[in-house]
Image (cartoon, rainbow, N blue to C red):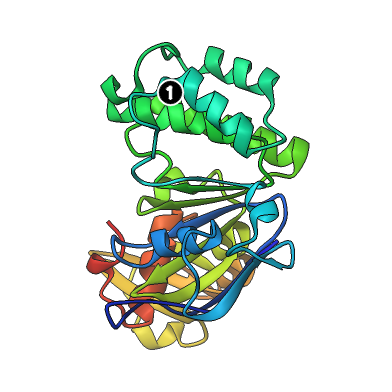
Amino acid sequence: MIKSVGLTKIFDGKKALDGVEFEIPEGSIFGLVGSNGSGKSTFLRLAAGIYMPDGGDITAGGERIFNNFALKSEIAYVGDTPYFLPNATIREMARFYRRMYPKFDNNLYNRLIEIFPLDYKARIATMSKGMQRQAALITAIASSPKYLLLDEAFDGLDAVMRKVLKSILIEASEERSLTTVISSHNLKDLEFLCDRVGLIHLGKLVFSDETENIKSRIHKVQMAFRQIPETSVFSGLDVVKVERSGSIIYMIVRGDEEEIMRYIGRLSPIFSECVEPTLEEIFVYELEAKGYDVKNIIS
């Protein structure tokens, strides 16, 4: 488990992270979302042991990470701009990682070389951005870490490679309880991959929960009436947002879906249905309800 308690990091007098607290269970795939500058990368660097906290604490498996060499050999980190040795090839980077990670899996490395269509003899510096990210992912995953930290993991990858990466991460989670933390500002990449998601804004954690819990607590309902009722008839529901278009009412509601639809059914609509919102829509609704400027948070 990765756990942060009151986690704070300060740069030039400004808090990049301000008292962030949450837990990432073993074997889970955790999505960390937020706008650029929200604190996602800072959290990952703290979790990788690159930065030392200025306040609070962050641990993995109950141990503090910073200056813990043994623990760091179980943590693989791929930054938003992956690092490679000067003029290195993938083969040379794999040799470097074998010295750093005692559990480096040569069979897995060979399998990943076949999956990702790269020239393992070519200089990585000559590759495209997407190919460089694939090269970093190959060596990080082949290191057989217990914790895998990926900053903007899908940046530069085409649709096929995104699907391949998701399959690899799901397989590793199921087969060897790999704990993966993926940061992204694009919720579409994470919606059907992550079992938990956390949202950071301006260095603070807005909320964190299981993906299914997030999806089950807010609903998008559309209904039609012969005569448009007053909004007061919906006072028995926890309504987040209401919009009208002609005889159609669109409503965002928190609560149990069956109870919501029973309540609406008693109002005798001509038509009503509950449509599952996307994870991005849910975050927008929740943030708007909390008074956040959504345009500056989710892109």
- 92 displayed left or right of 85: right
- 267 displayed left or right of 184: right
Crowd around label 1: few <14 · some 14–19 · many ≥20 (10 Å): few
Task: Tell me which corner region of the image, top left, top right, bottom left or bottom right, holds residue 213.
Answer: bottom right
Q: What's under tag 1, amino acid-wise?
A: Val
Q: Quadrant of the N terminus?
A: bottom right
Residue 126, placed above or below residue 96:
above
Instruction: Return the x and y of residue 177 as percentages of the image width and height.
Output: 74, 44
What number of labels is visible?
1
Query: Is residue 146 or residue 230 the one in the foreground?
Result: 146
| Secondary element type, mark 1 | helix
Residue at 36 percent of width and 72 percent of height: 201
- 255 displayed left or right of 294: right
Instruction: Return the x and y of residue 195 as percentages of the image width and height.
Output: 62, 53
Query: Is residue 130 or residue 221 the one in the foreground?
Result: 130
Can residue 5 be seen in the rendering of this structure? no
Residue at 55 percent of width and 12 percent of height: 114
Task: Tell me which corner region of the image, top left, top right, bottom left or bottom right, holds residue 64.
Answer: bottom right
- 119 displayed left or right of 11: right
Instruction: Return the x and y of residue 223 as percentages of the image width and height.
Output: 40, 63
| Residue that carries the numbered disc 1 in the rendered image | 160
Residue 142, placed above or below residue 70:
above
Instruction: Return the x and y of residue 136 as percentages of the image width and height.
Output: 45, 32
Query: Is residue 50 or residue 146 the one in the foreground?
Result: 50
